[in-house]
Amino acid sequence: MASGTPVLSADRGGVAELIGGSGAGMTFVAGDGVSLGEVAIQALRRDDLHCLGLLGRAYAEREHAWSRTFDRLFAVYRDLAA
């Protein structure tokens, strides 16, 4: 996502959650090769595939910038130390 590349992922796990939060890709049914193929073809036929990549890049910059990551990490440390 951070590189601006649209993401194709199984519909389970952390990557699927990131896609849902960012809108930066598409998911297929986990363990279903037919679903993977269908979703991959749908993705390649999209006129806005580049836009999905831009959404991913913007999401990564907004939610996972180092300054924000450190703020979250230090908040966890503060909570643990309290």
Image (cartoon, rainbow, N blue to C red):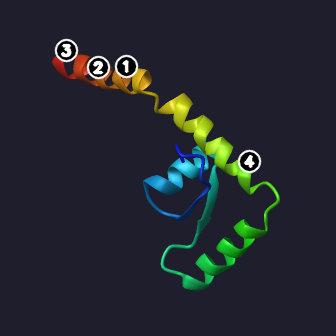
The numbered dot on residue 51 is 4
Q: Which residue is mark 3?
A: 82
Q: CA distance from mark 2 to mark 3?
A: 12 Å
Q: Which residue is mark 2?
A: 74
Q: Residue at x 73, y 48 (%)?
A: 51
Of the pair 9 and 2, the residue shown nearer to us: 2
Of the residues under marks 3 and 4, which one precedes in the sequence? 4
Whether label 2 touches label 1, CB < 8 Å: yes
> Mark 4 falls on what kind of element?
helix
- Mark 2 vs mark 4, foreground winner is 4
Whether label 3 touches label 4, CB < 8 Å: no
Q: Residue furthest bottom?
A: 34
Q: CA distance from mark 3 to mark 4?
A: 43 Å
Q: Position of residue 16 (x, y in %)?
A: 52, 56
> Mark 3 falls on what kind of element?
loop
Q: Which residue is mark 1?
A: 71
The tally of labels here is: 4
Q: Position of residue 42 (x, y in %)?
A: 74, 71
Density class for disc 4 (Cα within 10 Å; few <14, some 14-19, many ≥20) is some
Q: Quadrant of residue 21?
A: top right
